[in-house]
Image (spheres, rainbow, N blue to C red):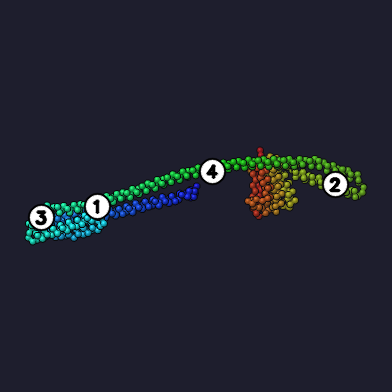
Amino acid sequence: MNGLGLIRRNQAVFPLALLAALAMLFISESAYWRSFGTLELLVAEREARAKVLDLRQQILDAEASQNAFLLTGNADYRAGYERTLAPTLALLGALDAHYRGNAKADTLLVALDAGIKARQALIAERMQQTNDGKPDLAAQFLHSAADAVHVNELHRLGNALLELGTMSVAASRMNINDALQLGRIGVLVLTAVCLLALVLYLRHAAASEAVQRELKQAIQNERDQLEGVVARRTELLTSLTQHLQTAREDERSRLARNLHDELGALLTSAKLDAARMKSRLIGGAPEVLERLAHLVETLNASIALGRSIIEDLRPSTLANLGLPSALDILAREYAERSGVEVHRALATVKLRPSAELMVYRLVQEAVTNITKYAKAQAVWVTLAARDGSVEVTVRDNGVGFDTSVPTSSAYGLVGMRFRVEAEGGALTVVSAPGQGTSVQVRMPESA
């Protein structure tokens, strides 16, 4: 189970996730631009505060230059005073531009501008009186109460502007704190959502893994059960094949005994009667002797056919001469009948009688299949013992076949395989179109 499957099962997951992402993006951008704007205001307010301080300093410099000029009459002090006029007006213009739209600041600036201009006019008048030779008249106002009030009023207005800037800075700081707090809350909320999503995902993954484990275990149990059923049925089929093969061989043995004992006795008795009749009919009619001779030939052919049938039903050569000799005779007779060259390499091996009979029947069926389907020019039959095992191979150079394609004629191979497995062996068939066929049996050697 993956994330796509979860989204397909719950259609609300994707819209909610998208909405949460957009909300977080909005909060983050809002906090950023709000903080950015507030920082610009702080920078501007700091510059304005510096201008207010510069303005105060210009006023103080102007006052100091005026006092020094009135006391000494030195023209350098008057030049220093005049140098403060232009910066003072420039600072007033800059402050007016900065605080434009702020009613309280505008009021303070108007009063400060009027006070500075009035003070400048008063200072200019005093300096002119000094130049006109009336220094005493100008000096009497130097430390007067009205002069102190005028100066204090200018300082008060400057301090009011500074206080207004301080309040603006405090408000800006509050705005920045609010923006940072909003971003912090957004991050905390997003973190909580992510942790919740992670917990849900881990729970979902754990549940999915548990389901997969249970499903895998169920499949494994079912597979084990099926393998057990297949093993039991295979064992049952093997036992049934062995039973059928044993019953088949027993039936063949019974038929062979009946043919040998009853039919053989009848044919032999008839041949003996024909021989007695022939001895008594010597010198009789030629036609009768000719018929009698034909009857004897027919009886001989019947006896030979009976022996052949009995040998096919129960190979006496296997019991009397052993497996290598029986296979040699089988191969030689096949070569004589079919005209196919048969190469034999037959060694003495140790097998149980039932296993020997199985090997004999397997070779017999293999050469029969070669006769029917292979169209071979040569056949190789080998019997050998290697490393405690017996190997039997029947190979031809016929047309071959594709072992991966099931055919209706493959039941013989299936029967061979079950008979070999019933004796504890293994059957291997190797073939390819145009490359012949090799049937190999490998089974344990008997003690």
Q: Nearer the viewer, mark 2 or mark 1?
A: 1
Q: Residue at x 38, y 47 (%)?
A: 189
Q: Amino acid at mark 1?
A: Gly
Instruction: Verify CB contact (< 8 Å) between mark 2 and mark 4.
Output: no
244 vs 53, nearest the viewer: 53
Name the secondary structure under disc 4: helix
Query: Which amino acid type corresponds to the residue marked 4 in the rendered image?
Result: Leu
Q: Residues within 10 Å of mark 1 (few under 14, many from 20)?
A: many
Residue 200 makes an appearance in the image: yes
Q: Earlier in the sequence, mark 1 or mark 3?
A: 3
> At numbered mark 3, what does the secondary structure look like: helix, strand or loop?
loop
- Between label 2 and label 4, give the one nearer the viewer: 4
Q: Is residue 111 left or right of residue 265?
A: left
Quadrant location of the C terminus? top right
Q: Which residue is rendered at x = 83% and y = 43% of the image?
A: 267
Q: Earlier in the sequence, mark 4 or mark 1?
A: 1
The foreground one among 295 and 35 is: 35
Return the x and y of residue 424 as percentages of the image width and height.
Answer: 65, 41
Q: Which residue is mark 1?
A: 165
Mark 3 vs mark 2: which is more N-terminal? Answer: 3
CB atoms of marks 2 and 1 within 8 Å: no
Mark 2 or mark 1: name the one nearer the start of the chain: 1
Q: Residue at x 9, y 57 (%)?
A: 138
Residue designated by label 4: 215
Q: Residues within 10 Å of mark 3 (few under 14, many from 20)?
A: few
